[in-house]
C-alpha cells in the first residue's frame, strides 16, 4: 500500500459490457494501493448494473443518452466534484467535450493499442499517471449476497453446471457458433458427466432459444429470466461457462468459480481472450484468423459459408479442453 497523490478520481467508459468489465482492474488496483482514494465511474445503463454495488466505487453515474444536452448537464454537475484526475477511456470528440466540461486538474486519455490485451491496455492508461499500480491477475466483480441467494434458490445445484451462452450479435459473423454444435456438445456433456446445461440469454433471445427446450431434462433455458447482475451471479454458480467473444463471457471471467472457455473466430485471443487464470480460449486453425472483421471477406473460398472460422471449431475441441484439464 501507499499514498496516491490523486484523492478524487473519475473514470469514463461508455458502451460494450465486456469493455467495462475489462476496465475494472483500474479501480481495483488503485484501491489496493491507496484505500482512501475516492473513485467515481461514468458508464451506460446496462454495465452500470454491474458496478453500482461495488464497494470500491463511491459513485456510479449513468449516461442516460448521448445527446450533447445531457452530456452538458451531467458534465457541469461533475465539475462541482473537483476531480484530481479524470481517466477518460472513451475516445471520441463527444466525450472529449464531456471531459472538458468536467475540468479535472489532470486528465489521461486512453489510446487503443491492439497489440495488448484490452485489460492491459485500459490498465496501462491509469498506470501512466500512477506508476506504482499493480495489475491483478484476475478480474473481479462484486455480487451482492441477496442477488446470489436469489439465483441460488432458483436453479438446480444437485449436479455440475455448464452454462452455454449461445447468442451474439447477428452482425458479427465471426462470433456465431451454430445450434447444431451447441446441441451436440450439450449431449456429449450430459452423457459423460450427467451435468445440468443452462442456456442463457436476454429477453430478446427467448424466441430464438425455443429450439433448446424439450431437448433433454438436463437442459434448461434461462433466457430472459435474469438481469445482468443476476446473470453474473448465475455464472458464479457454474462450473464451466462456454461462450464466444461477448459480454457474458467477460462477466463470467470476473466472478470467482467457473472455468471459462471462449470460442474465437474473427476476434483475436491476444486482444479479448478470457482474462485470468483457469480460463481457456479455442481459436480456429485457419490462416485468415484473426481478421477482426464483422463479415467474412473470404466466404467464397469456404463454399459461401459466412462464418467458416467458427465452424472450424468443433464440439470435440471443447470436450478435449474440459477432459484434459479436468474441469468437471
Image (tube, grey):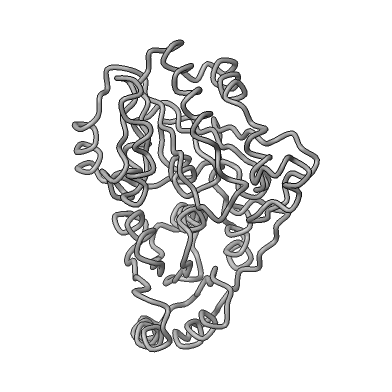
- How far across and how far down the image is residue 191, in percent? 43, 11
Q: Nearer the viewer, residue 133 or 305?
A: 305
Residue located at (70% from left, 57% from top): 114
The residue furthest top is: 192
Q: Nearer the viewer, residue 44 or 30?
A: 44
Res 79 → quadrant: bottom left
**Relative side of 317 to 94, left or right:** right
Q: Residue at x 60, y 43 (%)?
A: 273
Q: Quadrant of residue 153?
A: top left
Q: Is residue 132 visible?
A: yes
Could you tell me which residue is drawn at 27 percent across and 17 percent down?
158
| Residue 200 locus on image (x, y percent) | 37, 39
Q: Is residue 85 placed above or below 123 in the rendered structure?
A: below
Q: Is residue 1 visible?
A: no
Residue 254 lies, in percent from the top left, at 45, 43
Figure check: 14 above or below 295: below
x then y, percent, for residue 101: 46, 88
How many tags in the picture? Answer: 0
Amino acid at each position: 500500500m501507499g499514498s496516491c497523490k490523486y484523492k478524487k478520481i473519475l473514470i469514463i467508459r461508455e458502451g460494450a459490457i465486456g469493455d467495462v468489465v475489462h476496465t475494472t482492474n483500474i479501480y481495483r488496483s488503485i484501491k489496493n494501493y491507496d484505500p482512501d482514494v475516492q473513485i467515481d465511474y461514468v458508464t451506460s445503463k446496462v454495465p452500470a448494473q454491474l458496478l453500482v454495488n461495488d464497494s470500491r466505487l463511491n459513485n456510479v453515474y449513468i449516461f442516460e443518452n448521448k445527446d450533447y444536452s445531457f452530456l452538458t448537464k451531467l458534465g457541469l454537475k461533475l465539475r462541482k466534484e473537483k476531480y484530481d484526475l479524470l481517466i477518460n477511456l472513451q475516445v471520441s470528440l463527444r466525450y472529449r467535450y464531456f471531459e472538458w466540461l468536467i475540468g479535472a486538474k489532470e486528465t489521461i486519455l486512453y489510446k487503443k493499442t491492439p497489440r495488448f490485451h484490452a485489460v492491459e491496455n485500459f490498465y496501462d492508461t491509469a498506470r501512466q499517471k500512477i506508476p506504482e499500480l499493480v495489475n491483478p491477475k484476475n478480474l473481479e466483480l462484486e455480487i451482492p449476497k441477496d442477488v446470489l441467494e436469489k439465483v441460488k434458490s432458483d436453479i438446480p445445484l444437485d449436479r455440475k453446471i455448464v452454462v452455454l451462452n449461445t447468442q451474439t450479435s447477428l452482425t458479427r459473423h465471426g462470433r456465431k457458433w451454430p445450434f447444431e454444435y451447441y446441441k451436440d456438445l450439450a449431449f456429449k456433456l450430459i452423457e459423460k458427466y450427467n451435468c445440468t446445461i443452462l442456456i442463457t440469454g436476454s429477453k430478446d433471445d427467448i424466441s430464438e432459444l425455443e429450439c433448446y427446450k424439450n431437448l433433454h431434462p438436463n437442459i434448461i433455458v434461462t433466457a430472459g429470466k435474469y438481469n445482468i447482475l443476476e446473470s453474473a451471479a448465475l455464472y458464479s454458480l457454474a462450473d464451466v461457462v462456454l461462450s464466444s467473444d461477448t459480454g457474458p463471457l467477460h462477466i463470467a471471467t470476473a466472478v470467482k468459480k467457473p472455468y471459462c472457455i471462449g470460442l474465437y473466430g474473427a476476434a483475436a485471443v491476444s486482444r479479448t481472450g478470457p482474462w485470468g487464470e483457469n480460463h481457456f480460449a479455442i481459436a480456429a486453425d485457419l490462416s485468415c484468423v484473426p481478421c477482426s472483421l464483422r463479415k467474412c471477406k473470404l466466404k467464397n473460398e469456404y463454399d459461401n459459408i459466412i462464418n467458416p472460422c467458427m465452424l472450424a471449431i468443433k464440439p470435440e475441441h471443447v470436450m478435449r479442453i474440459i477432459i484434459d484439464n479436468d474441469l468437471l
